[in-house]
Image (cartoon, rainbow, N blue to C red):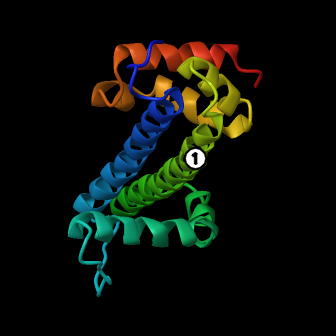
Amino acid sequence: METPSDVPAWMMCEDIITRLKEELILEAIDILHTELETGRVDITGYVPLLQDKPEQIQKDMYIIKNLRMREAQILDQYIPMLESKEEKDPQKIQRMEDLKKFVISVRAISALMRFSDIAGDWAQDTGRCAGFADPEEIMIKTLNMDEARCEVLEMALLSSKFKKSEALSAQEMKMLKDALHKSTH
C-alpha cells in the first residue's frame, strides 16, 4: 500500500489502528445505549466530568468502566440464576430473557473494550517502526508482537458493523487482511 510522500508509514499505521480502536469503543457505547434504552441498565447519581471532554461520552465511558470492573461480580451473581430450572410463568420468562441479554451485553462491552485496549498498545508499537517505509510490513511486524492483535483484527474484519462504519477505506481493509494472512500467528 502506498503512503502519501509526506506521511511516514508508521504514522499511517498508527492512524489506521487508532480508527479501529475508536470503532471498537463506539460499538461498546452502542451496546450500552441499547441497554439503557431497554432499561436493563439504569444509572442514577453523579458522574464526575472533565470540562474539555464531551459530556455524553464521559458518562458512557464512566458506566462502561464500572461495568467492566464489576463484570466478574455480575457474572457470578446472574449466571447461576440463568442456569436454574425451566420457568412456566411468562413474566419470569421475560425477566430471564432480559437478564440473558444484559449478561451478554456486559460480556460484549468488556470484550470490545479489552480489544480497544489491545489496539491502543498496538497503535503505540507502530511508532517503533519508524525505519520501515511499507505500511503492510509495519502491520505484519506489529501483529507478530502479540497474538491478541490478530484476534482483534479478525473480529474487526469479520464484523458487519465495522464494515458499515466505513472507518477504513477499501484499500486499508485490504492491506489489513493481507497483513493478517502474512502474520505468523
Q: Nearer the viewer, residue 167 or 32?
A: 167
Q: Position of residue 109 (x, y in %)?
A: 47, 54
Q: How many marks?
A: 1
Q: Position of residue 21 (x, y in %)?
A: 45, 44
Q: Position of residue 101 (x, y in %)?
A: 42, 52
Q: Residue furthest front?
A: 6
Q: Is residue 20 above or below residue 69?
A: above
Residue 151 figure quarter: top right
Question: Residue at 38% of width from left, 57% of height from top?
Answer: 98
Residue 80 figure quarter: bottom right
Category of crowding for the residue at label 1, using alpha-carbon neighbours closer than 10 angstroms: few (below 14), some (14–19), many (at least 20): some
| Secondary-structure class at tag 1 | helix
Q: Is residue 180 above or below residue 115?
A: above
Q: Position of residue 114 (x, y in %)?
A: 57, 52
Q: What's under tag 1, amino acid-wise? A: Gln
Quarter that holds the C terminus: top right
Q: Nearer the viewer, residue 147 or 38?
A: 147
Q: Is residue 74 shown to the viewer in this render?
A: no
Give left or right: position of 69 versus 159.
right
Q: Nearer the viewer, residue 105 or 58?
A: 58
* Residue picked out by circle 1: 124
Q: Nearer the viewer, residue 178 or 93?
A: 178
Q: Is residue 20 above or below residue 84?
A: above
Question: Residue at 44% of width from left, 60% of height from top?
Answer: 99
Question: Residue at 39% of width from left, 60% of height from top?
Answer: 89
Q: Residue furthest bottom?
A: 46
Question: Residue at 44% of width from left, 28% of height from top?
Answer: 159
Q: Is residue 123 shown to the viewer in this render?
A: yes
